[in-house]
Amino acid sequence: MERRSFIQILAMLGASAAIPRNAFAFETKQPDAPWLSAYQGVQHDLPVLSLHTEGSWPTELTGTLYRNGPAMMQRAGERYHHWFDGDGMIQKFRINPDEITHQGRFVRTEKFVTEEAAGRFLYPVAGTYRANSLPVANNDSINVANTNIFPIADKLLALWEGGSATEIIPDTLDTGRLISWGEGMQHLPFSAHPIRDQDGSVWNMGSVVYVSPAKVVLYHLSATGKLNKMKLLELDFGGYMHDFAITDEYVVILNSSCVYGEGRTFTDSFSWQPQRASQLIVLSKHDFSVVAQYDIEPSFVFHFAGAYQRGQELVVNLSRYKNADIMLSAMKELLATGYANDCEDATLSQLVVNMQTGKSTLHDTGMALEFPAWDRRQPLAQASTYGVGTSGRSAKLLNDAVVGFNFQQQQQQHYHYGPGYLVEEPQFIAKANSKPGQGWLLHTLFDYQRRRSGLAVLDAQQLSKGPVAMAWTDRAIPLGFHGCFVPAKG
Ligand SMILES: [Fe+2]
């Protein structure tokens, strides 16, 4: 039955039910906002060069930081207007005690290769309305592989949320094949936020909201990337879904109140529906059966910060937005004008659901925190959640701080770089022979006053002291979404 459903979905995807085609393009004048250079992308691969290091780099940070993000934002005078749209480029920072190097390479997706040869954009994209796009054969015709990069076995996967994972060769950053997890599963969405479990196996989902009824695909993979099981789950409505969480027993997804409907582009097809409760759906890890479903306060969430069970309670940590402005309007406003002043930051929040009574309580810390990271060696109830935040002195959506919050101790930490800097997702990297909770936060940043890009490392338990080491290059590296740190072997 599930296989038949997949085939039905694939037939619909092939029949251009995927992302709607766009009708025209428009240009905007580039405003005087120096941070926008970080969103303009680059036109070519970035060859290997050395960074200038400052401070003392911890020896356990020997390894490679990979990141992914939209980088081809304009071709032949046509510029994308939504940050989601740019073709993905992998940024590779090789960190050794004596040298740190950087290299950037575009992912050679079908779309990128075809458009590179043509010298212009040809296909529809998620957020920019454009004219005369070529027809879409399937989701991977427009896969930009621009959201995350995830290590599995000896491979890296460049991830998007609307189609397949794309294999990347770690040494060269060459693009390998598109990954299909099984017969009849080609081109199915495999989201950008797989979760590695304690046993090394990997959970993921894929949102298929543009068919009726809306669906989500659930995946469980072995540690080496073989499909253990999958399920296609029908949803009550097609809420935007980007990430999820797991506990010891459950997979937890959130069907948000940002609901797919009609529109000129994929993002324009969503509308914020605050009258509609969001749904927290709890699935058994054993067989993906629905254990429970709860109506919760209308929410918009890109990123979860983990979940756990506490007796009869299910505790879910999230970077929660009170509406979907960030995706529906603010990113376009930021790219067009340099400002998105009406957009509220995501705040670190904790949703506690009593699974016996179904009653849910939302605790909002009020602390702006996105791109959450934590020490996975530690029980989540005790762990601090780290992420990017704001000093309150930069324009909205310009994250200029690294922040942390511990729910158990109700304690905040922060280091404010302040105006002039854009701070990106931190990676928590355990210190050598350390206790749980002891580690480094490694993150990229862009200094838009000096137009230089860098790496910084902070002691996670002493954020307020600021970076213990940094590395800089005059090269403007495009901002990205997510990444991973792969320690050096041996
Ligand atoms: Fe994400």
Image: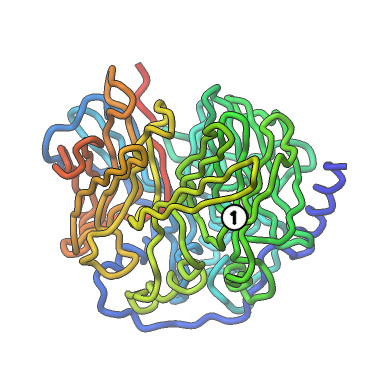
Residue furthest left in the image:
55
Task: Please give the residue where the numbered disc 1 appears in the rendered image.
Answer: 241
Is 446 situated left or right of 107 in this image? left
Q: How many marks?
A: 1
Q: Which image quadrant: the C terminus?
A: top left
Whether residue 484 is visible: yes
Q: Which image quadrant: the N terminus?
A: top right
Whether residue 146 is visible: no
Q: Residues within 10 Å of mark 1 (few under 14, many from 20)?
A: many
Check disc 1 and report its element: helix, strand or loop: loop
Residue furthest front in the image:
357
Task: Report the front residue among 313 and 74.
Answer: 313
Residue 424 is situated, as x and y percent measured from the top left of the image, at 32, 51
Judge whether 133 appears above or below 294 on screen: below
**Colour scheme employed for the rendering of this structure:** rainbow
Instruction: Specify the amino acid type for callout 1.
Output: Met
Task: Report the front residue among 125 and 172.
Answer: 125
Residue 325 is situated, as x and y percent measured from the top left of the image, at 48, 71
Task: Report the front residue among 488 and 234.
Answer: 234
Q: Residue at x 49, y 58 (%)?
A: 87
Residue 168 is situated, as x and y percent measured from the top left of the image, at 51, 39
Residue 134 is situated, as x and y percent measured from the top left of the image, at 66, 69
Q: Residue at x 72, y 37 (%)?
A: 288
Q: Residue at x 19, y 38 (%)?
A: 462
Judge whether 4 appears above or below 379 on screen: below
